[in-house]
Image: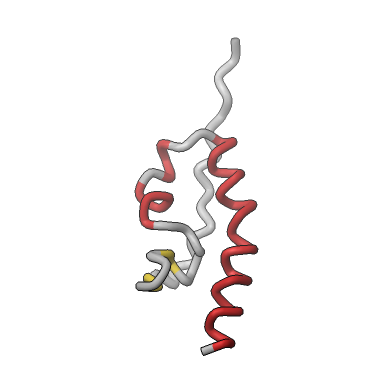
Amino acid sequence: MTEETPDYSSPCNRICTLDPLTETCIGCFRTLDEISFWTRFTNAERAAIRAALPEREKEHKERNARG
């Protein structure tokens, strides 16, 4: 069995600001747990988180547009 090479690349863009309502970073749209445990997740888990980020960003922008 071969070991999968970890893909630790992060969606962080150095705009680290926490949305107090959702406890999500408004720079990368990850939760605090996702940020904290990033290197402990499997590649599949990190890929699933990355896949969810565009929808989180969209929801954040819609909430802010409504006021």
Task: Classify the position of the N terminus by image quarter.
Answer: top right
| Residue 17 appears in view | no
- How many numbered badges does the structure rendering display? 0
Q: Which residue occupies 54% across, 43% down?
A: 46
Name the spot of residue 40 as percent of width and height, x first: 41, 36
Name the spot of residue 50 as percent of width and height, x first: 59, 52
Q: Which residue occupies 51% across, 33% down?
A: 42
Name the spot of residue 11 as percent of width and height, x first: 53, 57
Q: Is residue 27 above or below residue 49?
A: below
Name the spot of residue 7 as percent of width and height, x first: 55, 39
Q: Is residue 36 left or right of residue 50?
A: left
| Residue 56 appears in view | yes
Q: Is residue 39 above or below residue 22?
A: above
Q: Is residue 44 left or right of residue 22?
A: right
Q: How is the image coloured?
A: secondary structure
Q: Which residue occupies 60% across, 79% down?
A: 62
Q: Is residue 57 above or below residue 40?
A: below
Q: Is residue 54 left or right of residue 36?
A: right
